[in-house]
Image (spheres, rainbow, N blue to C red):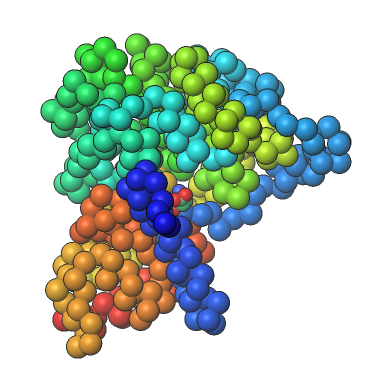
Amino acid sequence: MKKLSNRIEAIEESATLAMAAKAREFKQKGIDVISLSLGEPDFKTPIHICDAAKKAIDDGKYFAYPPVAGYQDLREALAAKYQKENNVPYKAENIVVSNGAKQSISNAMLALLNPGDEVIVFSPYWVSYDALVRLAEATPVIVKGGIENDFKVTAAQLEKAITPKTKLMIFSSPCNPTGSVFSKKELQAIADVILKHEDLLVIADEIYEHINFTGEQVSIASFPGMFDRTITVNGFAKGYAMTGWRVGYIAAPKWIADGCNKVQGQVTSANCSIAQRAALAAVTGDIAPTNQMVGEYRKRRDVVYNLLKEIPGVKANYPEGAFYFFPDVSYYYGKSDGTRTIKNGDDFCLYMLELAHVSLVPGGAFGDETCVRLSYAASEKDLVEAMKRLKTTLATFK
Ligand code: GLU
């Protein structure tokens, strides 16, 4: 009998990766698709990081299994970064380096959750949070932030959602998919609620910390009392254009880091040795290439924002970080071009791919059916062309 486990039956395929695969299929057929589905920098990994990887291979010293939690010098460098830049006194013992931020979150959930535990997921959320909670056989409790509050869940909403079963909450700032950034005041209010509940923990996903246009990146772990309650997640994919290198990490109280270490030791042994040497060069090296990329993202954010505003019926917030828009396109639900009717976000994305040759991700995968996600980690030329195509195609739906 071909029957997968209940655990796997309970989750969907990653919507971001599924849409990226669909766009690739169209491209293979020779169709000129502009892919705005995957959150993937269009920049190359900075040269000094690539050189460090080449040198690591030539040195001939990095062919053996690395320590499960990562090389000591990399863990020390990451702890030093958090002390200096984020004001959190992590030490090497608090760090576990993994195959991307996604595996880091998965390790933490598998290490902490039991069946029946509830996890509060701030919505809109990144697609894999909800699935990873279910993979760990716990129950996601979705708490939704509205567009009127820049999609941010408030401390009062959090407080209302907590039950005796709540073990964990998870959010990202800057947020994937909305680009919203929680201010220091908002995070302090959330921390105050968490601290009222003795065993409540938080996963703070800071993978977009570099791509923050507000000038203020605050780690919730830096507030008094929060060190012991926070699992900080970060990685190299976004800020250093290193998606394919697969290096992410957690920084957490030692007992949690030890738990993640145990999961990882059984599942993957460790993160790739050469990728770790590249990551060390990234975290200790010149930040100028990152700043340059961030400058570009900021420019593109404004270009796309202005063009989105010109499309009738589309409502967009002004994102302050990451590289996504999460516009409300529900104005088009129920509208038809004479052949097809857009019933929901899935249809919207399908028809935009088929007719405008622009790939987006349906918002339902992020917890909001009214929206779609658009990544602006693409060239300005492609973004302008994509917006033109969307506008022209949508004008045919009445
Ligand atoms: N985090 C990126 C995104 O949201 C990469 C895809 C993924 O891992 O889901 O598009």
Residue extending farthest bottom: 338
- In the image, taking residue 251 as reference, residue 71 lies left or right, namely right
For image coordinates 47% across by 14% down, the residue present is 255
The answer, for residue 259, to whether it is visible in the render is yes
Q: x, y percentage for residue 273?
A: 71, 36
Quadrant in the rendering for residue 344: bottom left
- In the image, taking residue 266 as reference, residue 302 lies left or right, namely left
Q: x, y percentage for residue 150?
A: 23, 44
Screen quadrant of the C terminus: bottom left
For image coordinates 29% across by 15% down, the residue present is 199
The answer, for residue 300, to whether it is visible in the render is no
Vertical arrangement, residue 34 with respect to residue 103, above or below: below
Number of labels in the image equals 0
For image coordinates 42% across by 56% down, the residue present is 1
Quadrant in the rendering for residue 219: top left
Q: x, y percentage for residue 259?
A: 49, 21
Q: x, y percentage for residue 118?
A: 25, 30
- In the image, taking residue 115 as reference, residue 251 lies left or right, namely right
Vertical arrangement, residue 318 with respect to residue 18, above or below: above
Quadrant in the rendering for residue 305: bottom left
Vertical arrangement, residue 19 with respect to residue 198, above or below: below
